């Protein structure tokens, strides 16, 4: 029988110690894993408070554009406001107002100068009749119709590219577009008010006054901006300058008698607005003179222009326009 050497303390170590240690290896290993896991789960105090690549001065604010925070100065706030897209909800209201303006402009233009400025269907017919020399009076009606039609086409291209270049529904784009239209109406009103353009309807048998081409050009130019806006806002049912196709779309609508039909309501509102605008132009021409119709049209277009300044920003509320 062999005796184990004594321990330094003089006691003999129990024989079960080795077995105990062997059986406890698993427990020691599990304890080490638990400790490692605990260390990983605990926040690293040194890393937490050490400034990194994406932070500055130990700040936890992260910016993918660099160490820059959002600028909240007055200038940046105004800039963001005008660079934001407008919410298309309820934009049918300013377009219906533009339909009233279209009625005012065409009622005045045809009554005073025998030519349309907005509705180019009539100008196309006058131009076609001019090929055969008709009508005999007023002379050169086809020439004024050709100029109005050409300017309308050219200004459509201008406004379309303007919206595409500056972002279609951006607030600043809408303000610029309608601001240009307002200026065209303002210049026309001043020309008539100062009698540079005769404030009286022309005599069909008198020689043509070529200065009339100037207001016709300005009115046709601004009319193109309205119909481009209706396309930009995806409200094709409010063209603001024509009623033929709009009436057809209204009557063939399968939901014509439905209780809830926004498109039908917009078409009816646009038709009534244009009709009332032309009727108002006739009444104002008889009572107050030609310039009053253009001044009224200019004030309405200016109101719409300022309306875009305070219009709701896109993204703050959601709506479905294509109801």
Image: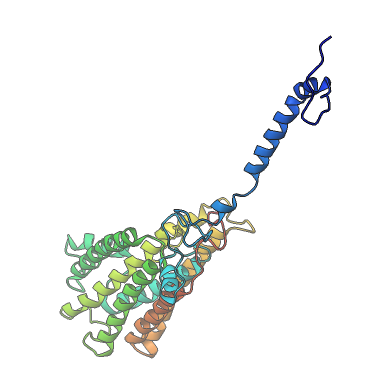
Quarter containing the C terminus? bottom right
Q: Position of residue 158 (x, y in %)?
A: 27, 63
Q: Position of residue 65 (x, y in %)?
A: 41, 56
Is residue 129 rendered to the left or right of residue 273?
A: left
Let me know if residue 72 appears in the view.
yes
Asked where in the image residue 117 lies, by quadrant, the reply is bottom left
Viewer-side residue, 166 vs 132: 166
Asked where in the image residue 205 lies, by quadrant, the reply is bottom left
Viewer-side residue, 74 vs 196: 74
Q: Position of residue 5 (x, y in %)?
A: 78, 20
Let me know if residue 208 appears in the view.
no
Residue positioned 70% across, 29% down in the render: 29
Residue positioned 43% across, 80% down in the render: 280
Is residue 149 rendered to the left or right of residue 310?
A: left
Q: Is residue 203 above or below residue 56?
A: below
Asked where in the image residue 219 lies, by quadrant, the reply is bottom left
Q: Is residue 222 above or below residue 25?
A: below
Quarter containing the N terminus? top right
Q: Is residue 286 above or below residue 2?
A: below
Is residue 90 rendered to the left or right of residue 118?
A: right
Count of marks overlaid on the render: 0
Q: Position of residue 77 (x, y in %)?
A: 45, 72
Viewer-side residue, 81 vs 135: 81
Q: How is the image coloured?
A: rainbow
Viewer-side residue, 203 vs 309: 309
């Amino acid at each position: 029988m062999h005796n184990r050497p004594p321990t330094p303390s003089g006691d003999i170590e129990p024989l079960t110690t080795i077995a105990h240690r062997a059986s406890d290896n698993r427990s020691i290993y599990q304890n080490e894993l638990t400790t490692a896991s605990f260390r990983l789960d605990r926040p690293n105090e040194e890393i937490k408070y050490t400034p990194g690549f994406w932070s500055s001065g130990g700040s936890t604010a992260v910016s993918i554009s660099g160490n820059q925070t959002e600028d909240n100065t007055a200038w940046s706030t105004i800039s963001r406001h005008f660079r934001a897209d407008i919410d298309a909800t309820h934009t049918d209201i300013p377009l219906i107002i533009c339909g009233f303006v279209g009625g005012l402009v065409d009622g005045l233009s045809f009554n005073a100068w025998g030519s349309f400025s907005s509705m180019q269907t009539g100008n196309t017919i006058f131009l076609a009749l001019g090929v055969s020399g008709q009508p005999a009076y007023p002379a050169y009606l086809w020439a004024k119709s050709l100029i109005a039609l050409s300017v309308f086409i050219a200004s459509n291209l201008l406004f379309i590219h303007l919206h595409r270049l500056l972002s279609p529904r951006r607030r600043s784009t809408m303000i610029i577009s309608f601001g240009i239209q307002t200026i065209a109406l303002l210049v026309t009103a001043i020309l008539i008010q100062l009698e540079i353009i005769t404030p009286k309807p022309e005599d069909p048998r008198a020689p043509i006054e070529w200065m009339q081409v100037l207001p016709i050009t300005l009115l046709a130019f601004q009319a193109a901006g309205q119909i481009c806006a209706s396309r930009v806002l995806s409200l094709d049912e409010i063209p603001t300058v024509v009623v033929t196709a709009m009436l057809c779309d209204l009557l063939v609508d399968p939901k014509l008698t439905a209780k809830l039909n926004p498109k039908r309501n917009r078409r009816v509102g646009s038709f009534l607005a244009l009709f009332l605008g032309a009727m108002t132009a006739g009444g104002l021409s008889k009572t107050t003179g030609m310039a009053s119709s253009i001044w009224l049209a200019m004030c309405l277009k200016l109101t719409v222009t300022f309306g875009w300044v305070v219009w709701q920003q896109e993204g703050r509320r959601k709506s479905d326009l294509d109801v």
